[in-house]
Image (tube, rainbow, N blue to C red):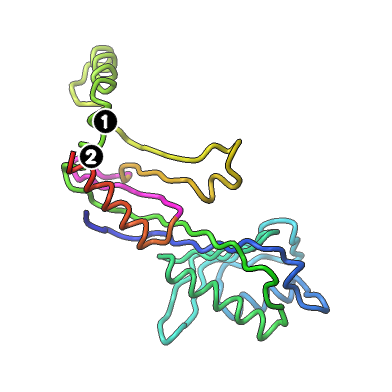
Amino acid sequence: MKLIGSTVGRCLKLFAWEEVRPTHGVNSAILATALAEQFNFQIRPTPPISLDQVVKFGDGAVIINGTMIAIQKFDIYSDGYAVDCSNTDDAKLVSDEIWRWAQSDLGFRDFIRPPNTIYLSQVTVEFAPEFENIFKGWKKLQDILNESAQKRYGFSQDVNVLRVQWRGDAHTLVNNTLVSDFWIERKAGEPYATNRWHCHGVLPTNEWLSLLETIEAMAIGD
């Protein structure tokens, strides 16, 4: 497997704001302005700001340990906040830096209970040609689809797998899309022969890449 690029790495922290807000409160407009200036956000909310809705920032940057890190997005929710960078290592660094700044400059308090940290990674990879062996159990289904479509519309190319997705049952798993959503799909604009796939997983970037390598090895081994 070859990594073509990492497009999104998200670090989401879920917690109760009432446990950490400054003792004397915080003005949402002042907070938004200070945050935008500190982290160089070019996309920032326009006052008045309602904390009952998602507050969105974007296109920012910060220097951490001498390295400039681009911040794709920073969203504030009623139950936490999320940082998007190009990978989850950077997103976690920025997330921690934002919280450190909020405590030192704005008086936010320590967490009473540790936040629940959730990761999301989106990468584009090029699998080995043998990777498609993983779909060999679908061959009979492909034959049925080929026969019905090819006869009706007069083409001879195979109808191939475009997207595969796995996710826990929303009726039994809380936050199922946040903690159990995995999918791979062929990269738009690329011919199937390149075997390039866009892959979404709720794991840190390095762990998701390792898991994709394991899946590829399973396919090749079969």
Q: Amino acid at mark 2?
A: Tyr
- The secondary element bearing badge 1 is classed as loop
Q: Height in image: 116 above or below 130?
A: below
Give the magenta range.
188-202
Whichever of callouts 1 and 2 sits on the residue coming sooner in the sequence is: 1
Per the image, the residue denoted by label 1 is: 160
Please rate how many residues cluster around mark 2, counting C-alpha atoms within 10 Å: few if below 14, some from 14 to 19, many from 20. some
Q: Amino acid at mark 1?
A: Asn
Q: Residue at x 38, y 59 (%)?
A: 7
Q: Are marks 1 and 2 in contact (CB under 8 Å)?
A: yes
Residue 146 place in picture, x, y as percent: 25, 19
Magenta-span inclusion, residue 107: no
Quarter of the image with the N terminus is bottom left
**Residue 145 has which mark?**
none
> In the image, is residue 52 above or below residue 67?
above
The residue at which mark 2 appears reads as 192
Distance from the alpha carbon under mark 1 to that under mark 2: 9 Å
| Image x and y of residue 172, in percent | 59, 38
Q: Give the percent coordinates (x, y) of residue 211.
A: 32, 53
